[in-house]
Amino acid sequence: MSQLVHTRQHGRVLVVRLNRPAARNALSLELALSLAGAFASVPSSTGAIALLADGDHFCVGGDVRAMAADDEPAAFVRELADNFHGVIRAVATAVPVVCGVQGWAAGAGLSLALATDVVIAADDASFQPAYPAIGATPDGGLTWTLPRAIGERRARSLLLRNAVVSAADALTLGLIDRVVPRAELEPAVLAEAAELAGGARQALLGTKRLLSASASAQLTDQLDAEAISIAEHIGSPEGREGVAAFIGRRRPEFTTAGG
C-alpha cells in the first residue's frame, strides 16, 4: 500500500488513514488510487472501518496545483473524478465506515466525509463545498449525499454560496453526527467503529443497500425489497443468533455467527 494511505487492523476495525499532511491531504490521483486500493483489500473479518487523516486537516479538496500544472486540465480532472468516484462507490458498499474530521473538510474532503456512515468531528473542524471558488461543480456524490443529509433547500444554499460551516453548526444542520474535543477525536472514532464492528455484519451491509436503493425506489417496491431482505437475514446464522439472544436475554455474539 502506498505511503499516501496507511492501514492497520485494530481488532475487527480496519483503520484507514490519509497520509498527505504536507498538502493538507489534498486529493491527488495517487491518493485516490491508494484509497481505492485500501477499500478493495478490506479483510473479510473486518466489521467496520475507521477513516482518519494525519495532520491538521482531514482533506482540503482536490489537488488544485496539480490541476493547474497539467496541460490538459479537463482530462486530468476527469481521470481524478473517475478514480475518486470508485472510492465513493467502495465506501457506499463497504461495512460501516466511521469518519473522523479535524480542521478542514472541503471540496472532495466534504464529499468523502458525507459518503461515510457516521461522521465525528473535532471541535475545530470546518466544512465547505469549495467547488465554486475554482469555478467547478461538485463531484464525489456531493449533490446526492448533501440534500439527503440536510434537505434540498439547505443544500442548495450551502453549495451555491460556498458557505463555511463550523462543527457546531454542522451538528445542528445534521451534516455530522457528533462533535468532540480535538484530542478525543481518534479514540471516539475507534470506539464507535468497534461498537459497529461487533454488530451483525451482513445485516448492516443489507441495511446500507436498502438505504441506497430508497432514493429512487417507489414505496411499494421498497416494501417488497425490505420483506425479502428481512426474511433472508432472519434465516441467516446472524439472524438465528440475534433471535436466540433476544429470547435468552443475553448479548448476541454476531462475530461467531457468520458475521
Image (cartoon, rainbow, N blue to C red):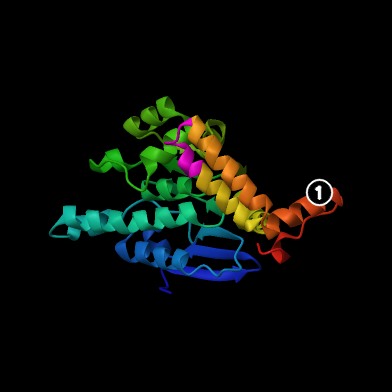
Residue farthest left in this picture:
71
Q: Residue 228: x, y in percent?
A: 57, 45
The reply, left or right, for residue 198 in relation to residue 121 is right
Instruction: Residue 13 in the image: state x and y as whole percent.
Output: 61, 63
Mark 1 lies on a secondary structure that is helix
Dividing the picture into quadrants, the one containing residue 10 is bottom right
> Residue at left 18%, top 56%?
75
Q: Which quadrant would residue 153 be assigned to in this image?
A: top left
Which residue lies under the disc numbered 1? 246
Viewed as shown, does residue 216 lie left or right of 174? left
- Percent of width and height locating residue 79: 25, 58
Q: Nearer the viewer, residue 163 or 37?
A: 37
The residue shown at (64%, 52%) is 233
Q: Looking at the picture, tell me which residue is in the foreground, 143 or 104.
A: 143
Task: State how many labels appear.
Answer: 1
Residue 88 in sight here: yes
In which quadrant is the C terminus drawn? bottom right
Q: Is residue 180 visible?
A: no
From the top left corner, tell me how far across and down residue 51 is, in percent: 52, 58
Magenta stretch encompasses residue 170: no
Residue range in magenta is 211-218
Q: Is residue 9 left or right of residue 89?
A: right
Q: Residue at x 43, y 27 (%)?
A: 154
Q: Residue furthest right?
A: 248
| Residue lying at 32% horizontally and 31% vertically, measured from the top left | 160
